[in-house]
Image (cartoon, helix red, strand yellow):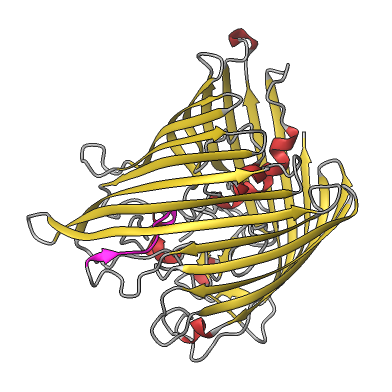
Amino acid sequence: MFGLGIQAQTPAIYNELNEALPEESNKEFQFIAYFYNHVINTNVYPTSDFLKGQVVGRLFGQNTSTTSDSLRPMYFEQRILPFFFYSPKLFDGRVTLRASFEIDFTWGDGSYSTGGNSGGAISSDFVNLQTQNLEVELIPVKGWKVNLGLQRMYDTPYNPYTTFFEKMLNTSYRLNYWGTDAVGVSVRKDNDFSSFKAGFYQLYENAIQLDDDVQLFEFNYRRRLNTKLNIGGSVYYIRDRGNGQGGPSIIGQGLNSTLAVFNGAYRFPFGSTNYKSDIAWLGGYFSYNDDILSDNLFASGYFNYNLGSTHLKPNEVWEKGPTIGGFGSNLRLGYRYDQTVNDIVWLDATYTSGDQNGIVDDKYSGVVTGNSWGTPAALHVNHGGYLLFPHANVVNRYIAAVTDISNMGLGISAIHVNASKDIIPHKFSTKVGMAAGWSNAIPAGGGKFIGTEINAKLAYQLGVFMSVELHAAYLNLGNFYDSSIVNGGIDGRPANPYTAFISFKWLMF
């Protein structure tokens, strides 16, 4: 369980990071670091001592997270992300080595040991450096880039090393399907009016002498129709021959893994039966006024259909297993009413198909995401909420009511409404929001309504790339949690979750 390194939580900071990074620099070697610290008061906590508070996944799920109407956990967490860039003049800027790392811990959590996400106790002396990226970018011809090694694997056509992270969270598939790091090779071509990316990633190798790997292939194309409107389409394909082998610790990975349950995805009930699967995602998307600078209106949306087949081997012969066919969709609409990009109101709506009876009819009609293979490997974090869907300002605890857009295979209908304002332009801002969610299929013993959230934020810029923020959110649980299947076996509806935290951020370079 200590293998649950929450690598995919970190992307929220890259918006600030990428705003600071020039595409070209005269320096051969560059170092940049992002420091993040927060103090949290909440009633959400894990009940297992084994997890030590390092928790990923769905609230009331198998990560043992729960809520209390009397306990009020309060703790400090800290993170630093160092980034190193080396581009020797010998190659005239055509070769760049990138490396990024992560050191996370909860204040007072451990010392004199080794592992990730710990090392904040007295005397410390803890070995806890985690590798995020280690890759080389080659530019064989102007406009073409080849990335080789451990790199960002995002469901976007944009270059993750030269694009504001905020843009990638608001366009294409918004990292709802793939938003993590993986080893492989990707090729991209960028110009003024279009871009495309093709990639191959080795998700799991397992035994090198056997055909038991998990591999992902991608092709994503974007076309700029005019100064404001972009459209695009993509094909993603995963070849899973791992049979659940590999993955974090002993929980495995794949369609039948405990990892899927932890992440709030649907777990195919194959048990110990050998399986293999082939799954494809066919999708299209659009965006209008990405940067909220060319017009008062802005919008983006996608539709993505996943389809596939499985085969089972209960004895010596492979047999056809359940098929897969489901879809996910998202629409984001907003209006800028004043001078800065924080002076906006926006609506964020998500709908995914659900399956009422699982694979009883030999077909799964829900959504499949990267959360069946990584932890987490698919994110939905830029909607304005904190508890209904997860928020990105986290270190060791990535918990929400719905952490995968499949909602355990039941499907989701959700809406977020937000309004923000720069009280002092570029210095002091505020934001308020509300959200509501419904399950598209009904769990046994429960209802459709997941809950209603209200939230608020205050942010003050202390200096260049340094800020302090106050966040708060409350989720009123609905009759969805009357079901013991989804509420962690609690007798009756659990206590409503809340969170409040003060954070300090500093991008140094």
User: Residue at left 32%, top 41%?
Assistant: 205
Vertical arrangement, residue 181 with respect to residue 432, above or below: above
Q: Percent x, y for residue 257? A: 34, 61
Q: Nearer the viewer, residue 215 or 302?
A: 302
Q: Residue furthest left?
A: 316
Whether residue 422 is visible to the viewer of this picture, yes or no, is yes
Q: Percent x, y for residue 55? A: 54, 64
Quarter-wise, where is residue 325 in the image?
Answer: bottom left
Looking at the image, residue 60 sits to the left or right of residue 26; the answer is left
Vertical arrangement, residue 303 with respect to residue 221, above or below: below
Q: Percent x, y for residue 125? A: 64, 49
User: What are the residue bounds of the magenta stretch?
Assistant: 362-371
- Magenta: main secondary structure equals loop
Q: Residue furthest front?
A: 226
Q: Percent x, y for residue 259? A: 40, 61
Q: Nearer the viewer, residue 312 or 300?
A: 300
User: Is 279 one of the magenta-colored residues?
Assistant: no
Q: Nearer the viewer, residue 271 or 311?
A: 311
Q: Nearer the viewer, residue 190 or 395?
A: 190
User: Is 364 one of the magenta-colored residues?
Assistant: yes
User: Residue at left 36%, top 53%?
Assistant: 306
| Quadrant showing the C terminus | top right
Quarter-wise, where is residue 330 in the image?
Answer: bottom right
Q: Residue furthest right?
A: 424
Vertical arrangement, residue 253 with respect to residue 262, above or below: above
Looking at the image, residue 360 sits to the left or right of residue 373; the answer is left
